[in-house]
Image: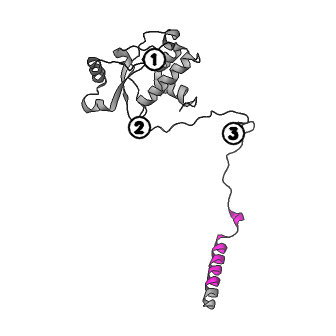
């Protein structure tokens, strides 16, 4: 039995020597080609010493991003007075959108029948930020993906920022009307509220 192990060990060592010999010395390997260096050209990356990178983690976004159609929902406000907005109760009642107005919004977006069950009507500029309950300010926000829930989160954070005078009311309203998703990234994600 011991003799068989010796023969096996000898065979393995012999195969190892043959494989190493076939490869030859490592000195014959060619270095990867490098592009020529142009005098005065910077070849190193930028020096990031002392650069403070943003301290946030981009959330995992699954599904699409629900955005209103600008021509159908440009946004509308009833007030631009910060004091009026900040004197509203912390929990403003949900909008009481009539059935006729709901149907008009869904029809204008083409979301009828079972398709409308995938959306919740939302105010682009919420009541808590001086928004109006009119068709120009109502849009169907998607329940799945990035939509209704993220927009609702943004509404609450913007109200807090407006009342703490970190953002003006007109800036908050404009941010919502122009691109609520970009505002969500700026005021919620980048500030660590997520």
The image's colouring method is one colour
Q: Which residues are magenta?
A: 8-33
Q: Check residue 70 for magenta coloring.
A: no
Q: Is 22 on the left-hand or right-hand side of 89?
A: right
Q: Secondary structure at mark 3?
A: loop
Quadrant the N terminus occupies: bottom right
Residue labelled with disc 3:
45
Q: Compare residues 118 and 33 and report the one nearer the observer.
A: 118
Where residue 171 appears, x then y in whole percent?
A: 53, 16
Q: Compare residues 8 and 186 and report the one nearer the observer.
A: 186
Q: Is 110 on the left-hand or right-hand side of 4?
A: left
Question: Which residue is pictured at 44% across the width and 39% down the height?
Answer: 62
Question: Which residue is pictured at 50% across the width and 27% down the height?
Answer: 184
Separation of disc 3 and disc 2 at Cα? Answer: 35 Å
Ranked by sequence position, the earlier of labels 1 and 2 is 2
Of badges 3 and 2, the one in the foreground is 2
Q: Is 68 on the left-hand or right-hand side of 104?
A: right
Are there few (<14), some (14-19), or many (20+) residues within 10 Å of tag 2? few
Ranked by sequence position, the earlier of labels 3 and 2 is 3
Of badges 1 and 3, the one in the foreground is 1
Separation of disc 1 and disc 3 at Cα? Answer: 47 Å
Q: Is residue 128 above or below residue 63?
A: above
The label on residue 63 is 2
């Amino acid at each position: 039995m011991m003799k068989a192990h010796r023969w096996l060990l000898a065979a393995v060592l012999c195969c190892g020597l043959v494989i190493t010999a076939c490869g030859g010395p490592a000195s014959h390997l060619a270095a990867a080609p490098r592009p020529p260096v142009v005098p005065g050209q910077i070849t190193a990356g930028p020096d990031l010493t002392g650069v403070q990178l943003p301290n946030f983690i981009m959330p995992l976004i699954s599904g699409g991003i629900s955005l209103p159609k600008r021509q159908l929902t440009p946004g509308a406000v009833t007030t631009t007075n910060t004091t009026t907005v900040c004197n509203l109760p912390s929990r403003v009642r949900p909008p009481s959108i009539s059935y006729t107005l709901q149907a008009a919004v869904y029809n204008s977006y083409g979301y009828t029948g079972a398709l409308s069950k995938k959306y919740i009507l939302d105010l682009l500029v919420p009541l808590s930020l001086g928004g109006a309950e009119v068709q120009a300010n109502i849009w169907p926000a998607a329940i799945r993906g990035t939509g209704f829930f993220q927009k609702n989160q943004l509404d609450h954070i913007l109200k807090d920022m407006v009342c703490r005078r970190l953002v003006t009311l007109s800036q908050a309203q404009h941010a919502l009307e122009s691109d609520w998703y970009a505002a969500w990234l700026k005021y919620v994600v980048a500030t660590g509220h997520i």
